[in-house]
Amino acid sequence: MTHHIPLPPFAPAAFLGNPHVQTVWPVLVRRIPVVAASAEVWPTPDGDGLDLDLLPSRPGQPGVLVLHGLESSSRMPYVRGVMALAAGAGWNVAALNFRTCGPSPLRGRRLYNAGDTRDLALVVERLLERWPGSALAVVGFSLGANLLLKWLGETGDAAPIRCAAAISTPFDLTASARRLDGPGFWPWLYRERFMRSLREKAARLAREQTMPFAESEARACRTFADFDEVVTARMSGFASARDYWERSSAGRFLAAVARPTLVASAEDDPFLPALAIPRAALAANGFLRPWISPRGGHLGWVGGAPWRPRYAVEPALLAFLRAELG
């Protein structure tokens, strides 16, 4: 069961209380924490390669694996922030880039998605071999958090890690897609930020390989519903976008999670309606440690002052990991 460390109430920095400002501030303004990471490419059984950033090994110390969000990478400030915290604690650290999110070209026929846990399972297995005897934690952000919770639910009591943390999880992918596909400037801005690169990746695949969709179909996608119907569902064997969303949403896997897991979410997250946060399921499983704040945006939690911001999720995460990893 989880150690019940106190999780502080969150107050946004002055002038940064708007949920959209909370969401975009760390991306646009935060300096990327410096870590001495080296890049490696790990081969996969299907002939592809996974890009990872790793810090120098510290034999016998715990390990932390970090998973980024949709169309992000291991170089994002929130990933580097956790890597720097873990390095400062004296732990082993690795960050995984999902397929097409790192520098290696895609050689196989699979894109990543919010429900395909095979690469995560492979990386965890290899990290345990690389760091023998080390207790391992996995920290996931946004899509990476959904993937992590789904994998923990799939593996249950057999999960080979000590603990986990899921930050800004889109627990209900149907509700999240509808929110991001909705009207208004901000949904359009978020949607275009993701769709632009997703369209290009899918179009390139269709141009270079035989795919279950045409290049023109990929380029025509303007919403998550379009993309997941045309690309994700066909490529990954789902009947439709709705089938993909329902079968891959982390919310339906929470009851089976059997490792101490910090779950941090904000009620004003622009990517997910507050009503879609599965409070009852989070409360029902004693392994889950929910930290639900009224404010914080998506991967935000910018406190302190604008000229000296503090990213509140990171000290809470470090305290949780210290308690669980020892």
Image (cartoon, rainbow, N blue to C red):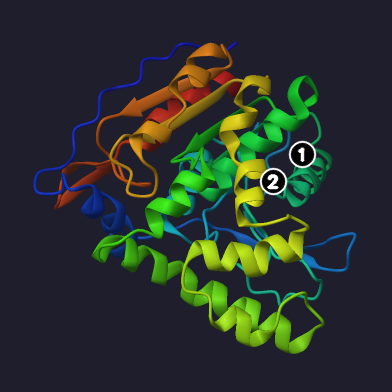
Mark 1 or 2: in front is 1
Front in this rendered view, residue 86 or 297: 297
For the residue carrying disc 1, how many other residues have a C-alpha within 10 Å: few (<14), some (14-19), or many (20+)? some
Q: Secondary structure at mark 1?
A: loop
Kindly tell me whether residue 65 is visible in this rendering: no
In terms of image quadrants, where is residue 97?
bottom right
- Quarter of the rendering occupied by the N terminus: top right
Residue depicted at x 69% and y 46%? 57
Q: Are marks 1 and 2 in contact (CB under 8 Å)?
A: yes
Specify the amino acid type for callout 1.
Trp
* Spot occupied by residue 42 in the image (x, y as percentages of width and height): 79, 61
Sequence-wise, the earlier of marks 1 and 2 is 2
**Identity of the residue drawn at 30% across and 29% down:** 293
Question: Which residue is rendered at x = 66% and y = 23% of the image?
Answer: 257
Residue under label 2, please give it.
57
Counting from the top left corner in percent of width and height, residue 154 is at 75, 32
Q: Tag 2: residue type? A: Ser
Q: Which residue is mark 1?
A: 131
Number of labelled discs?
Answer: 2
Residue 186: where, in percent of width, then height? 27, 61
